[in-house]
Image (cartoon, rainbow, N blue to C red):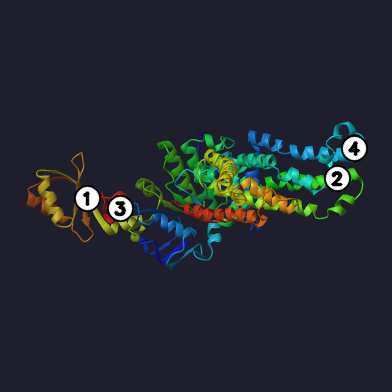
Amino acid sequence: MSIEVKDLHFRYGKIVALDGVTVTLGEGAVGLLGPNGAGKSTLLRVLLGFLVPERGEGKVLDYDIRRDQAMIRRAVGYMPESDCFVSGMDAVTFTSYFGELSGMPRQEAMKRAHEVLFYVGLGESRYRLLDTYSAGMKQRLKLAQALVHDPKILFLDEPTSNLDPTGRTEVLELIRDISTHKSIQVLLSSHILDDIESLCETVVILKQGKIAAEGRMDDLRAIHYSLYELRIKGDGAALRRDLESGGSRVDEMEDGLYKVYMPEAGDRMDIFRAADRAGVQVRSFVKSQTSLEDLFAGVVGVD
Amino acid sequence: MATVREKGYSHWDGKLLERRFRWWPITRTGIQLAFKKKAFRFFFAMAFLPPFIALAGLYISERLEDFKALVRSNKALLSIDPNYFKGFLTNGSTLFSLILVLVFAAAGLIADDLRHNSLQLYFARPLGKTDYLAGKMAIVAFFVLILTALPYLVLVLFKLIFAGNLKFIAQYPWLPLSILGWSAVLTVFLAFYFMLLSATSRSTRYVSIIIFTTYIFSAALAGILKEIFKTPYMGLFSIPADLEQVGAFLFGSKLPMTVPAVWSFAVLAGICLLSVVVLNRKIRGVEVIK
């Protein structure tokens, strides 16, 4: 396993940031989800060895997060959320500079910088001053500096923020390529659920410093809900009240579609019984896949 | 914008080095970046003017016969002794030109990193806070030493070459040590001073103003306080005066202030200590991951 933490506790003064987090992450792309203050950033900080946990233990690629911080940072490529660059540099100098700081020989770092800049689509503008780069270009540059020393794991913090739709698609494609074909594990922290859903097979949802849900996306969907989509004729409000009293959640879409999130123990026939009781005619009934958004809302408790 | 993946990703088959001086790339790159600035290059070149004048003086002092008309009334100026070197190394204009050079080279060393959030990139590498600060301070050290120790040690050599004998060094064997000692004190102080002020803001321009203000106005403040309290100890509030006092002490010359030199050493050491405290807080305060 590449990342393994057990019973991690960390607090900022009186504020509990991590409260007994235990998680094991394997290969591939892993999504880290959670509302603000859930402990995502703190977990990344602890994994990178910047913060020492109060209690608990952890390993990244078999390096202890307390003892082997330098080794972890050699093996990890980190792409921060905020814009960051060194003023007065061009992209090649910048990328090779951080390669060298990771421990690469100078000439190798320079050669490698050219390669990764071409890879992220900045080949043509690699000699331009970074001060003149657009937000999207800076985003790609951050990815380049994270990749330059050929890390075994990439920590990506909101990698598609500041990008236009085309740029977002392209960067997502890059990340998918890296995680699926290049044997680099990706830990992706994002608020954009679509990004996580399109890239990650595994997801970890944090809530108030604790793991709220963790596992393969398909398994989580299956475990937590059964989603049914129906179209009806009649008093939708009565049907809704009946279903909700039975523990289901009902969302009415703008186009008149009803989404019924039924607890895993529920029986779909209950929907028809409720419709019968409410005097509602069911005209369409489809069992659907839950989206990550549905899962997130259900686990974290927000719509 | 160019298409993503103009070339495919390939793994790097090299091995990451375990560097002894992990800060060295920071220093080298910082020096290179300084030389990219036109204003810096101009002031850097101008800062070599005093050593060239000193060199001319050395030459003339050994060829007095050839320059009789020129030095008839200024013979005392051309007596070459440790005071001659001290005069060039520690006078106000030399120190000010040094500050000017460093403002262009070093004011933004930390301020720029704070402004552009790049600290998190540094610390995501196998670098500690000490490595980061050592790398930045070594940039200041490089420029201070190249403008003080290097030219004046070379001047001592020129003096021996012009004289054609070793009499001068035999007479003042401690002079190279004084030059090195003064350069070392100046290097350490200016490195901490610039780091301290560079860490106080995210704006390089603001930091530059603060550097000049504290340097110049500390002297003005000392003058005012001296007038009010009628004690020479108030002169210790002046950074240039403290530097000159320490310089005079190291060259064995008459002290410009009538207070023990140890007090000036203490003031400069105090500023360095303050710098350590502030840097420790500021650099720690900027988290690696938001």
For marks 4 and 2, the one nearer the N-term is 4
Q: Return the residue nearer the eye: B82 or B153.
A: B82
Where is residue A96 drawn, in percent x and y? Answer: 60, 46
Q: Nearer the viewer, mark 4 or mark 2?
A: 4
Looking at the rendering, which quadrant does residue A28 occupy?
Answer: bottom left
Q: Which residue is mark 1?
A: A228
* Real-space CA distance between mark 2 and mark 3, rounded to the nearest whole angstrom: 79 Å
- The residue positioned 84% from the left and 34% from the top of the image is B73
Report helix, strand or loop for mark 3.
helix
Tag 4: amino acid: Leu
Q: Nearer the viewer, residue B2 or B73?
A: B73
Disc nearest the viewer among 4 and 3: 4
Q: Contact (CB < 8 A) between labels 2 and 1? A: no
Q: Which mark is residue A65?
A: none
Per the rendering, the mark at residue B159 is 2
Q: From this view, report whether residue A84 is shown above or below residue B277.
A: above
